[in-house]
Image: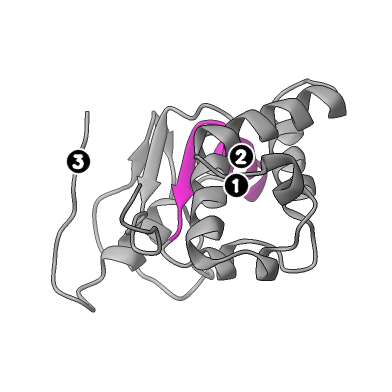
Amino acid sequence: EIVGLVGESGSGKSVTAMLIMRLLPTGSYCVHRGQISLLGDDVLNAREKQLRQWRGARVAMIFQEPMTALNPTLRIGLQMMDVIRHHQPISRREARAKAIALLEEMQIPDAVEVMSRYPFELSGGMRQRVMIALAFSCEPQLIIADEPTTALDVTV
């Protein structure tokens, strides 16, 4: 199933996605009525430990601006392997192989070389492809995509 949320610029689409993922600072939002139930979990009342367990493994988000979502001090490969190993019981070697395969699926040339680079060393389109690969890395049941193709070049 694919569901789209559309609206004018500034209407709150990105904020809604961030709230669903509970990525907004506590106290910066107020839900007057209703609830957010995501794959059977009560998002608004979930503890941080539970949120960390299902973010990535059950639900992943592709952010509009990958430079703010990727850690600028860590190489791409380490970030990808950390995410994969956090949610799957596999070795470093297996995580590395999976990360490379995902980058190749995203049509990133020289995926092995990209693994050793920092986010600032990649173009905006390459960073966005890395974010998409990260979102798919743990095979989540739900992916929330906030304008995932904005930074991609038209050949994709």
Residue closest to the eye, 24 or 155: 155
Q: Do the numbered discs 1 and 3 sit on residues whose CB atoms are within 8 Å?
A: no
For the point 50% across and 50% down, which residue is it? 129
Q: Is residue 69 above or below residue 60?
A: below
Q: Is residue 49 highlighted in magenta? A: yes
Residue 107: assigned label: none
Q: Which residues are magenta?
A: 48-63
**First in residue order: circle 3 vs circle 2:** 3
> Does 104 sit above or below residue 131?
above
**Local crowd size for mark 2, using a 10 Å CA cut-off: few (<14), some (14–19), many (≥20):** few
- From this viewpoint, which residue is outermost toward the right? 92
Drawn side of residue 2 relative to residue 156, left or right: left
Disc 2 marks which residue? 50
Q: Secondary structure at mark 1?
A: loop
Q: Is residue 3 magenta?
A: no
User: Mark on residue 3?
Assistant: 3
Q: Quick check: can you spot residue 124?
A: yes
The circle drawn on residue 47 is 1
The kind of residue on which mark 2 rests is Gln
Q: Is residue 3 above or below residue 148?
A: above
Q: CA distance from mark 3 to mark 2?
A: 25 Å
Crowdedness of circle 3 by 10 Å Cα count: few (<14), some, many (20+)?
few
Task: Please report contact status of discs 1 and 2: CB closer than 8 Å, yes or no.
Answer: yes
Quarter of the figure with residue 17: bottom left
CA–CA distance between discs 1 and 3?
Answer: 27 Å
Q: Please state the horizontal and vertical placement of residue 105, each as a whole percent of the image.
A: 52, 32
Looking at the rendered structure, the secondary structure element under dot 3 is loop
The N terminus lies in quadrant: top left
Kind of residue indicated by mark 1: Arg
